[in-house]
């Protein structure tokens, strides 16, 4: 209410009244009997104007002699001189070339007509980004254009996204495109991305999506060449809003979005067998193989049949030894398990909820004769789908101003400030991870009471005891005797904390000076600074090696500043020839520092809310400091020429020197295009252009890779047991990774050909591009034979190619009884190949010892790698005498996580104030390692393991037992080629489960199709809202990621364990993905 | 016009050089260290090689332990793959030999004979242990990355010979230096151990593996002379300093490695009659409780695998066992009995229980010695060497129903297979190494 008053009071001073007379009328489109809403009606040469309402009616105050200008996108602008009329009805003609006005941004952030552009760059409508209801700018872009892959890491609040243009180019360099915001590069670093810990965020999430005016994706090397090193993964050019309005001095927009998030897919679990194991595991006797016992010290769900239990209360031993939960519930040692209860729903409700997001934003546009201003303020407040410690709160403020100082000088300042805080939940391969403990919990265990007091048999109390289904060693986890083996999910989300706080500040002033006729100087400064604090808190009695408590904190600061100045000129020689040029120089300075420490093994366990260092012996207090400093300077020139209005040429060159190199590098590029419709005009092909380009960009070597270092190396095994150098006299050793002073930048060379076509008066538009891109001298830590004393060395040793086809299509069925209907589709295909990998068979990008995502010669990038079945020369699986497959002694490639093709199709249908839109996105032919499912088979939690059958004949098991006919077996029958064999607990807990050595069997088709979004919005009629002095008001309902079609079961196929790292296709107890229901209300004055 | 651009560009490029020069110097890491410090890394590597994955794998193969859950179920039935051995291999080369070579170079530069000697001893162990477990391994061309990017695989016997030579040189260089005074502390327990005795015991160990029993006996006689001169890894309850069995079993991978059905546990368990001992030993009941707690290893404060429990790297017991076995094999039963009974006396004292002395001789004595060594040296990779060398004289159970022997070697690791052009080819798990053929 107060807001409304404020808005009214703001607007009143600008409402100037002319008494001359009121003119009204209806605007229609030619050939349509319905009014055209949203037409701008402006009095020529003044700031006064209005818009037509939903019925196409308008009303404006004007005087005789003035001219009314009617303009609408897609229509020819019409001017009408006012004589004595008071009613002016207008019929607008459809513009012949409405799409010829589409603007894209070049790599330097300059506007350029799409029709003159020689690259495959595409523009994405900002409205699509804002409609998505995603907290980050980038997540909303997914599926909108060809050649761009956006994958949200997880459903956790504030989770970052993996961004890839075309295919992966580099092994050691960043895989993220260069992000240019308002002409200057900004940081898009992601922290995290291993197999455990918390989900990684992305610094692009710091930008308020509502501030975005448009986004251009530069996919090709030629288009990006002015940025040289750093542009090898393409460029995303983002422009924020400016105070740029039609006919109004002031406008204010208020938006209120609420979103309800739900888990989009969940695992199914068997609830027929309880916690325990086959008696065989204890006795080793074959006859005990199908005798299942309840065993609270077993982490398996291969226990007794729950329905065979007596029922009723468990028989317990009442005595001193007990666990008392916070609410007073007491648990005594169980003597006999009688209860038939199962607790999946209880355990689910303990942790999951409907997530809720509330985003408020206000923006203000203010125009004066000499300038314009855009201001915005927003707050995003999100509570995740987990009941505690999973949230994201972001506040942003922006001030953009453009001021004309003289006719020749213009200055512009864009600035934004972001403060965000978030809490995240541990995930992945992590004894304290959420899904790990949650999914492994047996059906018959109630997780509700996770914290309380344990009393031993003498009645001595231990406070803050942690109750979980499985204890460590021989301890009873359900009494919280000692720290458990797996954390109770209740403990994971309520007791462990992983807060993170970010303050970010971006400032970029720009000067535009028209030096001479046709020659301009542009100078920009960019300052991008953030400070991030991350804590990680494990209270005493958490699982694993932090069971005596651990507190870690790091504070990182990143500062990137850049200066970019260029001269540009345009020279029109005659009507058949003109050219323009740009020459400039650029300095970039990046600085990163992270300081922090860790206290572990608390000496005072009574910490309360205090999170600080000093609560451990000196040896367990470890400080940490990392710094990084990089600079880069470059000069560049761009030359554009246009011949006979149909031939276009562009040459770009860039010299640069990054601090990681000792000599300069040159990056050239050239493009040419022909608009053949200038010559062959016809009614079917309205516009046609063919284009070809060649460009080079690069990736500089990682910092400090030239040196071999010495450090106090801890010596341990892959299981985590370790001898810490710091407590053994801190001896220094030479790193097993050898430095290399002879590194050169990676060089990406790309040819691109394409065409942009429009048919039938622009009803159908097609953009088609083929590219062939090759990265030479890709840098990687090449594996060395460990017997050389080094296990790896940095070297320019790989060649990677990406070839692909990109197709974007738009079909506009405009003006049909007031219905505006548009369909957009895109298709991308990328063939990625690691052509050469010198001196090494594979390089691990991310993952586990058993299953990983690697770079392998002759295979697509990020190929999945792991244990395989042994095969003979004909490719048949080798069977052992038990009839089971044998394990190959060597690991190899087992899958390809890259999609064979991907695409998106969306439609927008509007009628009067109603708009309905949807967007599908699909990935086809990509493999994924279903790690979680494989492990749930091991644990006997997977539904497949709960099957029971009577053997109809004598059969063998994997451990060589012969099972007589007529035996009741829990498991399944399989035939590997030598007749039927039994897959029982020994198969699943052995080679046939996720802890077995053969990950090949868990590679599944990870193709998916998602209904990315569906939205219905309604713009309120003008006559309703004008009473409230509003210029627009709309309400929309959307759903995002609500439907998934995929052969991969139980998980959102998009989640990736290793976040936005280059390792792809790994799924292992990753926090679940989400779908959202979104309600948005927008009001404007 | 174009010319002017190029001139302008190159002028600007020139001025750019100053802007970015001198920044590519690592502000986070050191680029050199003294040999006196680096030797500590080699020592840590030695501890890890003895007490880490090799030890667990050996313990499972020789059925001292049970691979009970998760990935260790596969190890239990010898279902291992090349990648499982990457860590062991990396550790000995990149953590061990690579570092000792640097130490040796720096010791020569600074004329530090003791440091040179210690690094020679550690390097000999790194090479010999690899040869014992893997067979033919790179040594003569190892840790010279520029000259030999693909080191050739030396014959197993040549590696042992080279290790013996290095140990001899080491003994000459260390003089009578104590481990605790020179480059052994704080990785090894502070006691009276002498580098020279340790090295003689190691020579005895490797002669035993190559079945040169007479030489082994002679070296054992010069080897570790009292219990207090044993070389033991130091452990405490500080994070990162705990006994690796404790760290593995309690802190990291609970339940993976147990003694649920293990032969050793059955042998010692007074209430399990399925496996008997040749030598009547009432004290085993006490020892059983020190080793095990239920199905699990005993990780308690007084347990053999407790957090602060020192782990033997090469100790007086091992030396005595070598002495006893070689004397039997050289038909000196009396000398063998004297050596062996010293062990029994020491055990009686250690566990305050009855470990009767032996009177028998001959082949039974040999089995008794090996049996006692199998029990006493729990967790030592040397037990795995013994079982293979003696063609499983103790009849340790074979845990895979399709196998006819216990595994005869560790598989060549994936990391070396993928990278070394001189790699001679994959050898199966049940192919004996040259010393045991």
Image (cartoon, coloured by chain):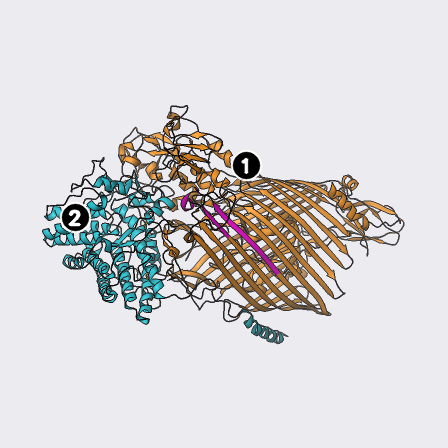
Chain colours: A orange, B cyan
CA neighbours of label 1 inside 10 A, class few (<14), some (14 to 19), many (20+) = some
Residue A248 % position (x, y):
77, 51
Residue A932 shows in the view? yes
Q: Secondary structure at mark 2?
A: helix
Q: Is residue A545 above or below residue A732?
A: above
Q: Is residue B150 magenta?
A: no
| Among the 4 quarters of the image, the one containing residue A466 | top left
| Among the 4 quarters of the image, the one containing residue B17 | bottom right
On screen, residue B30 versus residue B150, left or right, reads right
Q: Using the image, name the chain to which the residue with label 1 belongs.
A: A
Q: Which residue is drawn at the image coordinates 21% and 36% (left, top)?
A: B274
On screen, residue A339 versus residue B156, left or right, reads right
Give a yes or no on whether discs 2 and 1 share a subunit: no
On screen, residue B6 versus residue A1064, left or right, reads right
Q: Which mark is residue B369?
A: 2
CA neighbours of label 2 inside 10 A, class few (<14), some (14 to 19), many (20+) = many
Instruction: Give yes or no for contact between labels 2 and 1 (Cβ–Cβ under 8 Å).
Output: no
Which span of residues is magenta-colored? A527-553
Q: Is residue A702 above or below residue A269?
A: below
Q: Is residue A550 magenta?
A: yes
Residue A485 % position (x, y):
40, 41
Residue receiving disc 1: A353
> Which of label 2 and label 1 is nearer to you?
2
Residue A431 % position (x, y):
42, 43
Residue A143 shows in the view? no
Residue A375 % position (x, y):
70, 52
Q: Which mark is residue A160?
A: none
| Among the 4 quarters of the image, the one containing residue A276 | top left
Q: Secondary structure at mark 1?
A: loop
């Amino acid at each position: 209410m107060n807001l409304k008053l404020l808005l009214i009071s703001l607007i009143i001073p600008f409402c100037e009244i002319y008494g001359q007379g009121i003119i009204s009328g209806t605007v229609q489109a030619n050939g349509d009997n319905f009014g055209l809403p949203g037409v701008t009606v402006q009095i020529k040469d003044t700031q006064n104007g209005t818009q037509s309402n939903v019925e196409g009616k308008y009303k404006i105050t004007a005087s005789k002699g003035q001219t009314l200008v009617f303009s609408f996108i897609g229509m020819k602008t019409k001017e009408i001189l006012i004589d004595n009329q008071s009613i002016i009805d207008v019929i607008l003609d459809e513009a012949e070339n409405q799409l010829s006005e589409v603007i894209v941004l070049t790599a330097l952030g300059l506007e350029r007509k799409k029709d003159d552009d020689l690259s495959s760059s595409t523009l994405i409508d900002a409205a699509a980004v804002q409609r998505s209801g995603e907290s980050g700018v980038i997540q909303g872009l997914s599926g909108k254009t060809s050649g761009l892959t956006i994958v949200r890491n997880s459903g956790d609040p504030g989770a970052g996204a993996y961004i890839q243009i075309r295919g992966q180019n580099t092994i050691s360099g960043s895989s993220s495109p260069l992000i240019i915001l308002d002409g200057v590069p900004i940081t898009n670093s992601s922290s995290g991305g291993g197999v455990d810990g918390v989900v990684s965020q992305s610094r692009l999430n710091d930008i308020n999506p509502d501030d975005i005016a448009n986004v251009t994706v530069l996919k090709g090397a030629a288009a990006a060449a002015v940025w040289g090193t750093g542009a090898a993964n393409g460029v995303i050019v983002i422009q924020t809003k400016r105070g740029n309005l039609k006919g109004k001095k002031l406008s204010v927009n208020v938006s209120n979005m609420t979103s309800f998030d739900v888990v989009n897919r969940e695992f199914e679990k068997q609830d027929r067998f309880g916690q325990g194991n086959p008696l065989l595991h204890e006795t080793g006797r074959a006859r005990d193989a199908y005798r299942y016992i309840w065993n609270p010290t077993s982490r398996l769900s291969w226990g007794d049949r729950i329905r065979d239990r007596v029922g009723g209360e468990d028989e317990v031993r009442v005595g001193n030894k007990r666990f008392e939960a916070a609410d007073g519930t007491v648990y005594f040692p169980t003597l006999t398990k009688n209860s038939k209860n199962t607790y999946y729903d209880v355990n689910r409700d303990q942790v999951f909820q409907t997530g809720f997001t509330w985003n408020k934003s206000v923006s203000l546009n203010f125009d004066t004769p000499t300038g314009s201003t855009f201001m915005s303020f927003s707050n995003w407040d999100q509570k995740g789908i987990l009941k505690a410690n999973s949230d994201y709160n972001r506040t942003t403020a922006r001030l953009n101003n453009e001021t004309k100082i003289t006719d020749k000088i213009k200055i512009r300042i864009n600035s934004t400030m972001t403060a965000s805080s978030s809490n995240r939940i541990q995930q992945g391969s992590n004894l304290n991870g959420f899904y790990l403990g949650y999914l492994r919990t047996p059906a018959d265990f109630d997780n509700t009471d996770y914290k309380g007091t344990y009393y031993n048999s003498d009645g001595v109390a231990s406070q803050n005891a942690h109750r979980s289904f499985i204890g460590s060693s021989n301890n009873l986890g359900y009494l919280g005797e000692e720290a458990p083996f797996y954390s109770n999910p209740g403990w994971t989300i309520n007791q462990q904390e992983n807060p993170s706080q970010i303050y970010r500040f971006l400032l970029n002033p720009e000067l535009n000076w028209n030096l001479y006729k046709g020659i301009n100087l542009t100078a920009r400064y960019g300052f991008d600074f953030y400070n991030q604090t991350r804590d990680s808190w494990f209270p005493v009695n958490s699982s694993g090696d932090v069971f005596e408590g651990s507190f870690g904190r790091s504070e990182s600061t990143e500062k990137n500043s850049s200066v970019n100045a260029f001269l540009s000129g345009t020279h029109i020689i005659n009507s058949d020839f003109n050219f323009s040029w740009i020459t400039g120089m650029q300095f970039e300075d990046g600085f990163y520092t992270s300081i922090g420490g860790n206290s572990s093994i608390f000496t005072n366990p009574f910490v309360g809310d205090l999170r600080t260092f000093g609560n451990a012996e000196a040896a367990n207090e470890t400080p940490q400091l990392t710094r990084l400093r990089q600079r880069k300077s470059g000069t560049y020139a761009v030359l554009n020429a246009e011949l006979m209005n149909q031939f276009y040429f562009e040459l770009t060159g860039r010299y640069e020197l990054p601090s990681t190199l000792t000599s300069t590098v040159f990056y050239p590029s050239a493009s040419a295009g022909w608009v053949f419709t200038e010559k062959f005009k016809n009614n079917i092909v309205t516009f046609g252009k063919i284009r070809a380009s060649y460009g080079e960009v690069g990736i500089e070597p990682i910092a400090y890779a030239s040196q071999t270092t010495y450090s106090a190396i801890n010596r341990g095994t892959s299981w985590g047991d370790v001898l810490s150098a710091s407590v053994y006299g801190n001896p220094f050793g030479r790193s097993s990774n050898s430095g290399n002073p002879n590194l050169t930048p990676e060089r990406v060379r790309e040819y691109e050909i394409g065409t942009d076509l429009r048919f039938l008066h622009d009803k159908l538009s097609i953009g088609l591009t083929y590219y062939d891109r090759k990265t030479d001298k890709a840098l990687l830590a090449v594996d060395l034979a460990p017997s050389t004393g080094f296990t790896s060395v940095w070297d320019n040793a790989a060649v990677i190619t990406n070839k692909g086809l990109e197709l974007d299509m738009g079909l506009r069925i405009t003006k049909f009884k007031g219905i505006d209907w548009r369909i957009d589709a895109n298709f991308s295909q990328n063939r990625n190949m690691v052509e050469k990998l010198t001196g090494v068979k594979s390089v691990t990008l991310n993952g586990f010892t058993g299953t990983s995502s690697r770079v392998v010669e002759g295979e697509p990038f990020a190929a999945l790698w792991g244990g395989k079945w042994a095969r003979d020369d004909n490719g048949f699986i080798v069977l052992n005498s038990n009839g089971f497959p044998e394990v190959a002694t060597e690991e190899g490639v087992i899958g390809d996580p890259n999609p064979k093709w991907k695409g998106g199709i969306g439609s927008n249908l509007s009628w009067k104030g109603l708009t309905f839109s949807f967007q599908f996105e699909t990935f086809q032919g990509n493999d994924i390692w279903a790690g979680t499912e494989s492990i749930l088979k091991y644990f006997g939690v997977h539904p497949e393991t709960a099957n029971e059958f009577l053997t109809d004949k004598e059969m063998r098991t994997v451990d060589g037992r012969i099972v007589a006919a007529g035996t009741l077996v829990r498991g399944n029958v399989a035939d590997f080629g030598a007749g039927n064999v039994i897959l029982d607990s020994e198969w699943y807990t052995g080679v046939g489960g996720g802890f077995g050595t053969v990950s090949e069997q868990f590679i599944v088709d990870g193709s998916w199709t998602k209904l990315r979004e569906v939205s219905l919005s309604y713009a309120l009629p003008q006559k309703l809202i004008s009473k409230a002095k509003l210029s627009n008001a709309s309400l929309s309902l959307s759903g995002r990621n609500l439907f998934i079609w995929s052969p991969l079961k139980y998980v959102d196929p998009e989640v990736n364990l290793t976040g936005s790292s280059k390792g792809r296709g790994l799924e292992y107890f990753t926090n679940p993905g989400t779908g959202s229901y979104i309600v948005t209300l927008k009001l404007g004055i | 016009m174009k010319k002017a651009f190029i001139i302008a560009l190159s002028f600007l490029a020139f001025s750019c050089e100053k802007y970015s020069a001198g920044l590519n110097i690592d502000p986070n890491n050191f680029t050199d260290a003294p040999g006196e410090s680096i030797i500590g890394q080699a020592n840590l590597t030695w501890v890890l090689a003895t007490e880490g994955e090799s030890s667990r794998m050996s313990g499972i193969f020789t059925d001292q332990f049970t691979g009970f859950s998760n990935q260790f179920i596969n190890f239990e039935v010898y279902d291992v793959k090349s990648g499982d051995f990457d860590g062991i291999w990396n550790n000995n080369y990149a953590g061990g030999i690579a570092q000792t070579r640097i130490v040796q170079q720096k010791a020569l530069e600074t004329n530090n004979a003791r440091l040179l000697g210690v690094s020679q001893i550690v390097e000999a162990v790194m090479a010999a242990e690899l040869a014992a477990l893997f067979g033919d391994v790179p040594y003569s061309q190892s840790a010279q990355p520029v000259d030999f990017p693909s080191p050739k695989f030396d014959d197993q016997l040549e590696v042992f010979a080279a290790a013996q030579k290095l140990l001899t040189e080491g003994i000459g260089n260390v003089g009578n230096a104590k481990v605790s005074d020179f480059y052994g502390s704080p990785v090894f327990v502070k006691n009276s151990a002498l580098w020279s005795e340790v090295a003689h015991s190691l020579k005895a160990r490797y002669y035993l593996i190559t079945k040169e029993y007479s030489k082994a006996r002679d070296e054992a006689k010069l080897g570790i002379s009292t219990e207090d001169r044993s070389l033991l890894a130091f452990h405490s309850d500080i994070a990162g300093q705990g006994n690796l069995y404790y760290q593995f079993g309690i802190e990291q991978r609970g339940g993976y490695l147990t003694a649920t059905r293990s032969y050793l546990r059955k042998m010692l368990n007074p209430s399990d009659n399925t496996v008997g001992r040749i030598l009547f030993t009432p004290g085993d009941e006490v020892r059983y409780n020190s080793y095990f707690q239920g199905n699990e290893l005993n990780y308690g404060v007084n347990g053999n695998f407790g957090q602060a429990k020192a782990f033997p790297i090469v100790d007086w017991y091992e030396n005595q066992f070598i002495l006893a076995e070689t004397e039997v094999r050289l038909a000196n039963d009396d000398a063998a009995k004297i050596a062996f009974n010293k062990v029994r006396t020491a055990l009686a004292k250690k566990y305050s229980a009855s470990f009767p002395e032996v009177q028998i001789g001959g082949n039974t004595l040999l089995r008794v010695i090996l049996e006692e060594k199998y029990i006493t040296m729990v967790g030592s990779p040397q037990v795995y060497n013994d079982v293979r060398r003696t063609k499983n004289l103790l009849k340790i159970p074979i845990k895979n129903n399709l196998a006819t022997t216990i595994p005869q070697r560790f598989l060549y690791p994936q990391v070396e297979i993928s990278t070394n052009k001189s790699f001679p080819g994959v050898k199966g798990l049940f192919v004996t190494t040259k010393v045991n053929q």
